[in-house]
């Protein structure tokens, strides 16, 4: 067992770090508060080989590992937290499902511009009545001629205001086996958007409405019976979420550490007070422990998909450690960490959201508990069925 990065990983980390310092240090605060998706950064990252890190080289990707992508997103986030969203969208999100399961035609048409940083894909899974219970989704894909008619609605879609194409979770038929996903382009007939709502994190989402949208059969990414593949792909999204939680927690931790050594009260540096020293010790402990779980999930996955259990543990630990660090950092910095002129305030808001997004803390605990007892616990009221995991 080796807890060190390999020589290659260290070189890669250093190159991403210097890219971030060179291009992203300036303007990090402004980017955090900008409404627009940072398209300029996306193109810059595409040019630097930071999009499609785990995608196959023959598809225009880099052919790297999930661990490489984790290193990249963390290095970017430690300099410019908002720019880490571009790494997420270009490596961990719906793009990974498309790269893994998409047809050659889908890759040519959709993956290529995504890897070039010229388009953006969102995943639309959650519905008004299907949140944690995602398998209760009711958006349907009904056969019609050479394609499907999509009917239904989605909520909370990240980047819904900016995405050029959407990976929509749909129902072809009843039950879990009836769930799959299709691509729908922005601008498709019958595809409309509701009024934007702003999350505490500053992210805007708007309801998506599919009113008999015609989608050609070529746009099916995962057909009936593919729900397991769908969720396996979604675990990659969770690793990106975990990485950003941890990285933003570290960002806040470093800001607070710097502040504590320079800010003086009662004639002493803040770092002289034991009550604050212990906060730092606790934060460091949690951040380091979460880092190991994250690396474990990523290295075990190699270029494939991480396991559900390792992902759940990594996300739980990173979400908690990240939010706790941001929250404590804000407390340690007093008023100086509470305003919009400090990225600590931004880290606090973003890390809070990730305890809900991508599978809530409670749903992840359920998943870990299933591993503990080796059974699947049905969450439904009438059911006492216990299937083997
Ligand atoms: C910042 C952000 C970004 C998001 N981005 C996207 C996106 O891009 N695409 C997308 O499709 N969705 C997205 N979501 C939606 C997200 O996936 C859902 O919010 C999440 O799955 C929870 O669903 P819900 O909000 O409907 O809460 P509910 O499912 O209604 O849950 C409410 C509360 O009950 C708890 N709960 C529910 N069931 C159980 C149970 N069985 N055991 C214990 N506790 C339980 C939950 O943990 C939660 O605390 C995003 C959400 C946020 C906050």
Image: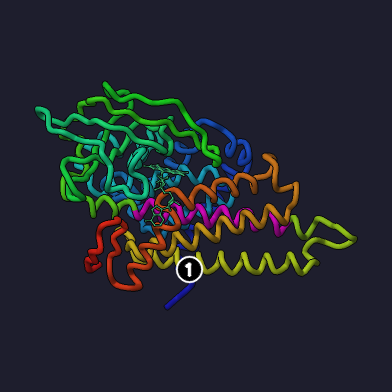
Q: Which of these two is toward me, 92 or 62?
A: 92
Q: What x and y, as percent, mark residue 344?
A: 64, 48
Q: Which of these two is toward me, 103 or 115?
A: 103
Left or right of 257? Residue 242 is left
Q: What x and y, as percent, mark residue 378?
A: 28, 60
Q: What x and y, as percent, mark residue 195?
A: 45, 25
Residue at the image position 38 percent from the left and 51 percent from the top: 237
Q: Badge 1, how many Cα within 10 Å: few under 14, some, many 20+?
A: some
Left or right of 289? Residue 186 is left
Residue 325 colored magenta? no
Picture layout, residue 353 above or below residue 332:
above
Q: What x and y, as percent, mark residue 331?
A: 70, 54
Quarter of the figure with the C terminus? bottom left
Q: Which of these two is toward me, 374 or 22?
A: 374
The secondary structure making up most of the magenta span is helix
Count of picture labels: 1
Residue at the image position 67 percent from the left and 39 percent from the top: 340
Picture layout, residue 94 above or below residue 160:
below
Residue that numbered label 1 is attached to: 292
Residue at the image position 26 percent from the left and 50 percent from the top: 230
Please state the extent of the stretch shown in magenta in the rendering.
235-258
In the rendered image, is residue 107 in sight? no
Q: Residue furthest bottom?
A: 1
Q: Quadrant of residue 67?
A: bottom left
Quarter of the figure with the N terminus? bottom left
Q: Residue furthest top?
A: 189
Left or right of 173? Residue 236 is right
């Amino acid at each position: 067992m080796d807890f060190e990065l390999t020589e290659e990983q260290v070189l890669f980390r250093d190159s991403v770090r210097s890219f971030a310092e060179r291009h992203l240090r300036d303007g990090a605060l402004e980017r955090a508060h900008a409404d627009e998706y940072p398209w300029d950064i996306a193109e810059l990252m595409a040019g630097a080989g930071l999009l499609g890190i785990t995608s196959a080289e023959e598809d225009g990707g880099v052919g790297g590992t999930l661990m490489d992508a984790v290193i990249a997103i963390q290095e970017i986030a430690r300099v410019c937290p908002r720019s880490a969203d571009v790494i997420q969208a270009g490596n961990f999100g719906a793009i990974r499902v498309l790269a893994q399961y998409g047809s050659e035609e889908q890759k040519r048409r959709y993956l290529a511009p995504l890897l070039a940083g010229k388009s953006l894909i969102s995943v639309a899974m959650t519905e008004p009545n299907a949140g944690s219970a995602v398998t209760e989704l009711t958006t349907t894909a009904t056969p019609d001629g050479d394609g499907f008619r999509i009917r239904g609605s989605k909520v909370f879609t990240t980047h819904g205001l900016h995405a050029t194409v959407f990976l929509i979770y749909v129902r072809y038929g009843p039950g879990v086996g009836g769930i799959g996903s299709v691509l729908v382009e922005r601008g498709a007939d019958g595809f409309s958007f509701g009024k934007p709502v702003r999350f505490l994190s500053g992210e805007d989402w708007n309801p998506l409405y599919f009113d008999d949208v015609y989608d050609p059969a070529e746009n099916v990414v995962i057909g009936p019976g593919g729900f397991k593949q769908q969720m396996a792909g979604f675990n990659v999204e969770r690793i990106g979420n975990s990485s950003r939680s941890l990285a933003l927690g570290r960002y806040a931790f470093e800001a607070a550490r710097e502040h504590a050594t320079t800010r003086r009260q009662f004639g002493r540096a803040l770092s002289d007070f034991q009550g604050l020293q212990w906060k730092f010790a606790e934060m460091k402990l949690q951040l380091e422990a979460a880092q190991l779980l994250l690396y474990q999930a990523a290295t075990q996955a190699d270029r494939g998909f991480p396991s559900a259990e390792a992902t759940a543990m990594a996300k739980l630990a990173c979400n908690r450690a990240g939010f706790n660090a941001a929250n404590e950092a804000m407390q340690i910095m007093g008023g100086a960490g509470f305003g919009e002129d400090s990225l600590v305030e931004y880290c606090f808001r973003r890390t809070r959201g990730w305890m809900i997004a991508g599978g809530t803390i409670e749903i992840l605990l359920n998943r870990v508990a299933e591993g503990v007892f080796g059974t699947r616990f049905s969450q439904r009221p009438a059911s006492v069925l216990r299937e083997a995991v």
